[in-house]
Amino acid sequence: MNRYKLREHTFKLLFLAEFYREEERAEQIQLYFEREELEGAGQDARNLVIAKYENVLEQVEVIDNRINTVASNWKTDRMGKVDLSILRLAVYEMDYDDGVPTGVAINEAVELGKKYGQDESPAFINGILAKLC
């Protein structure tokens, strides 16, 4: 499984996390992997997705504070869940994942915004992330 697909599955889990309590997350991860086809991906790919998902959630307060410092008139509690989940993942990759160059994190976030967000999502995501560089 390529990195884009791993990132996309991580985004989807982060999006789902917005709708469940913390104690329900393990069950939701299991259900997600039962529903989603991971194109021949084995346990290693699932472990990578889960690890990044958990790492983002561990840093979510710090990440949200970073986003809030540059998001004029759009604090995280007012953002759409799709855009917020994409931004959280991208900021995590920019700040904590040395294996992902900043430009790649931004580009991939914009691509996820095009695929899953609204018409204005790619520009919104790009604008927020550009201010964080």
Image (spheres, rainbow, N blue to C red):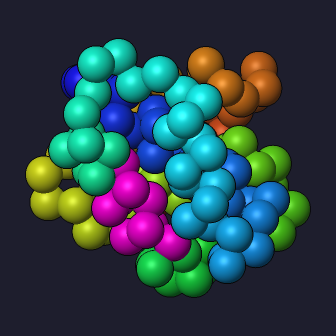
Q: Quadrant of the C terminus?
A: bottom left
Image position of 94 (left or right of 24)? left
The image shows a total of numbered marks equal to: 0
> x, y percentage for residue 114?
61, 20
Q: Quadrant of the N terminus?
A: top left
Outermost left residue: 99
For the stretch drawn in magenta, the main secondary structure is helix
Q: Quadrant of residue 116?
A: top right
Residue positioned 22% across, 61% down in the render: 97
Residue positioned 19% across, 44% down in the render: 44
> x, y percentage for residue 91?
43, 60
User: Which contiguous range is marked in magenta?
Assistant: 49-57
Image position of 29 (left or right of 4)? right
- Establish if 94 lies above or below 75: above
Q: Quadrant of residue 73?
A: bottom right
Residue positioned 54% across, 51% down in the render: 30
Answer whether residue 94 is magenta in the image.
no
- Establish if 10 lies above or below 97: above
Q: Is residue 4 visible?
A: yes
> x, y percentage for residue 122?
61, 29
- Establish if 82 lies above or below 118: below
Answer whether residue 56 is magenta in the image.
yes
Residue positioned 67% across, 77% down in the render: 22
Image position of 85 (left or right of 42)? right
> x, y percentage for residue 90?
43, 51
Q: Is residue 68 visible?
A: no
